[in-house]
């Protein structure tokens, strides 16, 4: 038996911190990084007699999410108390939603893998519900005591739950990435993973291929990077298959991933759902969302990544992978759309290559955001236009891009002029160069005549070099072939 | 359905209540009484009746998303049993 005999079943639960100014049930600020307990008001620290008042901004963000994934936004939903005892939860219960969540169903379509093995998969969602975050316990040394910071207590979260439909860690990561891009796209969360605004729990089980019954699952908690998500799932799959193949059984449990050791460790045996003794919170009336409200939110929604991807594929003939890459963020998509709008759809593919290639690489290298790229869409479009009309070669374009990036020129035309990068298309200028190159490389000429295609490319390279990148490669090709009698 | 002695201890543990055997026995009797009542209610045919989540037929009022609270940490921590460096201190709990 081996890995190939087993089918992996993964469901994800993601806690997305909503980008509201204030907490879900109190008027405390949600700003990150405040001194401990400076943003913990009476409601957050659970003083007796206080009552929660629901934040409209949190509800509105849940509606946006529901609309974005084509889910049902519940006209009426209910808040429930989830009871457990822990010092960073001073009420003794977390206000959450249980029986009637605000969002039910919906799907997210993801691209898994790239190149020839890439495929599309529709991930079904079970639900998304509103809830409050807990505080933080600091177990460092306080004379054998724990320190409690309640700034985070009451921060609004949307918990987004999938059906157990993912079959590999790659699919889980593709979904998590797509979800991360989506919540930022519709502006309901900053998605900052270092600050804990986007945390995944993975429910993992395995079963023999061809069987229907789900295996016993273990839940890997609190994964706050895509890399850890993948590694944790892989470690968990390996553990479960090894245990079962050795004749053991899987105990339902909550586990933590230790990235240093590369393994998962049981935290506690999974408490049954009813151990939380959920019941409707009498402090909160049913949340009623009117059709008018939903219609208004719908009218304010931006074009969604999936719609934009379809437009990129249909109107610009981009591959599914390119379309998905360019819609990784709203800012990147906007940059691309602006570039193509300025240069014309005929240059849509080169524009995609430059945005995903040179531009993305430079931004990445310098740790910049695309909104603050030194080369603006109009400038990139100007450069692409000069490639399209054969004024410059691709290699010269790199120099133009450099000049624009470093602020040495304000436009592509200026850079071309200043650096003399205009392609030489005058035959009388190129012919002598070609003759020189042929004379200087008799070996390559001989090899080409003997049938070596590579030798021809070497000669083209020599000519381009001798012309300092100014010759048009197409023209050089043609002329060389003529001279070698191969045309 | 009636509860066992073990059930009572489990429920007490979840609620962090310490019960001795005598108290557990008394609680068992009371809880079974409540279960008896629930059983009678569950015997009623409720097909087609919407579950009631709140006795008042009202909708939740919503608050505009604005930070309105001011920092009152010092006042809150003055009445806390123990606080240090702005943190509330509690007996160490690590699961």
Image: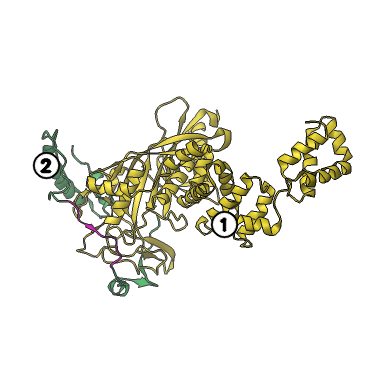
Return the chain for callout 1.
Answer: A
Residue B95 position, x and y percent, is 40, 54
In this rendering, the label closer to the viewer, 2 or 1: 1
> Observer-nearest residue: A211 or A424?
A424
Residue A413 position, x and y percent, is 63, 55
Identify the image quadrant of the N terminus of chain A: top right
Residue A391 position, x and y percent, is 66, 48
Can the viewer see residue A17? yes
Helix or strand or loop: what does disc 2 sit on? helix
Colour-to-chain, green: B
- Up the image or down, A401 lies above or below A125; here it is below
Reading the image, the residue beneath label 2 is B37
Reading the image, the residue beneath label 1 is A375
Left or right? Give the position of A141 relative to A271. Answer: right
> Observer-nearest residue: A33 or A264?
A33
Residue depicted at x 54% and y 56%: A376
Q: What separation in Å lies between label 2 and label 1 (alpha carbons)? A: 74 Å
- Up the image or down, A117 lies above or below A300; here it is above
Left or right? Give the position of A341 relative to A464. Answer: left
Residue A355 position, x and y percent, is 56, 49
Can the viewer see residue A84? no
Return the chain for callout 2.
Answer: B
Helix or strand or loop: what does disc 1 sit on? loop
Report the magenta stretch's main SS. loop
Colour of chain A in the image: yellow
Left or right? Give the position of A247 relative to A83. Answer: right
Residue depicted at x 14% and y 41%: B38
Identify the image quadrant of the C terminus of chain A: top right
Magenta residues, start to end = B59-68
Reply yes or no: does residue A369 show up in magenta. Answer: no
């Amino acid at each position: 038996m081996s890995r190939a005999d087993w089918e992996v079943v993964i469901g994800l639960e993601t806690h997305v911190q909503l980008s509201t100014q204030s907490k879900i049930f109190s008027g405390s600020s949600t700003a990150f990084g405040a001194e401990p307990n400076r943003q913990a008001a009476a409601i957050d620290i659970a003083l007796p007699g206080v009552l929660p008042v629901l934040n409209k901004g949190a509800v509105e963000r849940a509606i946006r999410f529901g609309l974005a994934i084509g889910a049902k936004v519940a006209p009426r939903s209910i808040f429930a108390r989830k009871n457990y005892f822990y010092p960073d939860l001073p009420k003794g219960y977390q206000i959450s939603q249980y029986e009637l969540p605000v969002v039910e169903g919906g799907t997210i379509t993801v691209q898994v893998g790239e190149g020839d093995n890439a495929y599309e998969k529709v991930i079904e969602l079970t639900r998304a519900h509103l809830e409050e975050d807990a505080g933080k316990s600091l177990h460092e040394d306080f004379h054998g005591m724990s320190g409690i910071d309640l700034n985070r207590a009451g921060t609004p979260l949307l918990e987004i739950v999938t059906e157990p439909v993912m079959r590999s860690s790659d699919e889980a990561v593709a979904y998590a990435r797509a979800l991360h891009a989506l919540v930022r796209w519709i502006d309901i969360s900053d998605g900052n993973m270092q600050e804990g605004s986007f945390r995944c729990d993975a429910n993992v089980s395995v079963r023999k291929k061809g069987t229907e019954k789900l295996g016993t699952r273990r839940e890997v908690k609190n994964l706050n990077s895509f890399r850890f998500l993948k590694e944790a799932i892989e470690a968990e799959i390996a553990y479960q298959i090894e245990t079962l193949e050795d004749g053991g059984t899987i105990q339902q449990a909550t586990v933590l991933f230790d990235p240093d050791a590369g393994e998962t460790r049981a935290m506690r045996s999974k408490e049954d759902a009813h151990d939380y003794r959920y019941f409707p919170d009498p402090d909160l009336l049913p949340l009623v969302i009117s059709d008018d409200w939903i219609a208004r939110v719908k009218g304010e929604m931006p074009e969604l990544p999936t719609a934009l991807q379809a437009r990129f594929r249909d109107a610009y003939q981009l591959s599914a992978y390119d379309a998905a890459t360019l819609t990784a963020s709203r800012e990147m998509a906007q940059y691309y759309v602006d570039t193509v709008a300025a240069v014309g759809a005929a240059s849509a593919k080169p524009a995609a290559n430059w945005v995903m290639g040179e531009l993305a690489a430079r931004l990445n290298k310098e740790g910049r955001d695309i909104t603050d790229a030194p080369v603006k869409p109009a400038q990139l479009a100007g450069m692409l236009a000069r490639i399209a009309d054969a004024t410059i070669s691709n290699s010269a374009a790199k120099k133009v891009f450099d000049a624009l990036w470093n602020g040495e020129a304000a436009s592509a035309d200026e850079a071309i002029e200043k650096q003399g990068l205009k392609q030489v298309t005058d035959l009388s200028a190129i012919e002598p160069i070609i003759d020189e190159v042929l004379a200087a490389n008799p070996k390559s000429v001989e090899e080409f005549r003997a049938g070596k295609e590579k030798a021809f490319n070497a000669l083209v390279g020599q000519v381009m070099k001798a012309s300092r990148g100014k010759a048009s490669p197409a023209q050089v090709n043609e002329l060389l072939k003529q001279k070698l009698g191969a045309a | 359905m009636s509860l066992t002695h073990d059930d009572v201890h489990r429920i007490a543990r979840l609620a962090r209540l310490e019960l001795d055997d005598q108290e557990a026995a008394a609680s068992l009797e009371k809880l079974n009484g409540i279960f008896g009542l629930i059983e009678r209610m569950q015997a009623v045919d409720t097909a087609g009746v919407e579950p009631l989540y709140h006795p008042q037929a009202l909708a939740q009022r919503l608050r505009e998303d604005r930070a309105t609270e001011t920092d009152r940490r010092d006042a809150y921590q003055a009445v806390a049993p123990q606080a240090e460096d702005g943190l509330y201190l509690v007996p160490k709990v690590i699961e």
